[in-house]
Image: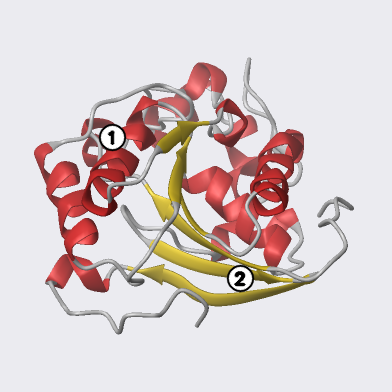
Amino acid sequence: ILSLKIKEGFSLTKLILIRHGRTLWNSSGKFQGQSDIELSQEGISQAEKLAENFPVTHIDRVYSSNQTSYITGEIIAKKFNVPIIKDKRLCEVSFGSWEGLTYDEIHEKWPNEIKHVSTPDVLTMPEGESFAQVKTGVEALLDIVNKHPDETIAITAHGGILRTLLAYALHMPLRYIWTLRQDNTAVNIVTFYGDKINVELLNSTAHLSLTQLPKLGRFS
């Protein structure tokens, strides 16, 4: 979806992309966007279960976007005793006037615009952004890869931006990003190997049932 490039040269950087824990607005079916909404008690529990049943044995640091994602990232960072870094470029797409409203409420006020939800490549939210405008999120992703060669990095963010980052890794057009399900605290693993990208895991929530995930080594 973008022509951005990884720096030349060999290195292996593993990214653990994680959606934030469940929020109060997730529970009530409201569009969240860039609004900073607290995690529900269920969301905190989800993040704690993920930290206890993390899919790799080692991470070097955590990156996060806004406060909603930061809380999830902080729980993981404390478990591994590593720093957590805020990067605003990883923020969710702005849903503008739709933030805080349910699908039915949006449909009542913007019946024509809401029809384009199924085609995110042409969707622009009223007073918000389009998914085509989130180039900065992919730029941040590649900056992290280039800045931290041979490291394992956890990134906690929102579902929309994660779908966009995964679409980049999968060479997928934006039109199809809703085919990538992203549940709360879902884990995705993407490895950058030189100039190659390998998607190892998508939307895993095995930690929520306390299933012990197979531990992947630092470079496995």
List x then y, in percent, for residue 102: 36, 31
121 vs 60, left or right, is right
Distance of label 1 from label 2 (alpha carbons): 24 Å
List x then y, in percent, for residue 105: 39, 26
Screen quadrant of the N terminus: bottom right
The label number, if any, that marks residue 191 in the structure image: 2
Quick one: label 1 or label 2, which is nearer the N terminus?
1
Foreground pick, 159 / 211: 211
Q: Is residue 157 visible?
A: no
Amino acid type at circle 2 is: Thr
The label number, if any, that marks residue 105 in the structure image: none
Q: Which residue is mark 1?
A: 71
Q: Residue at x 23, y 60 (%)?
A: 50
Res. 15 image quadrant: bottom right
Q: Is residue 163 visible?
A: yes
Res. 43 image quadrant: top left
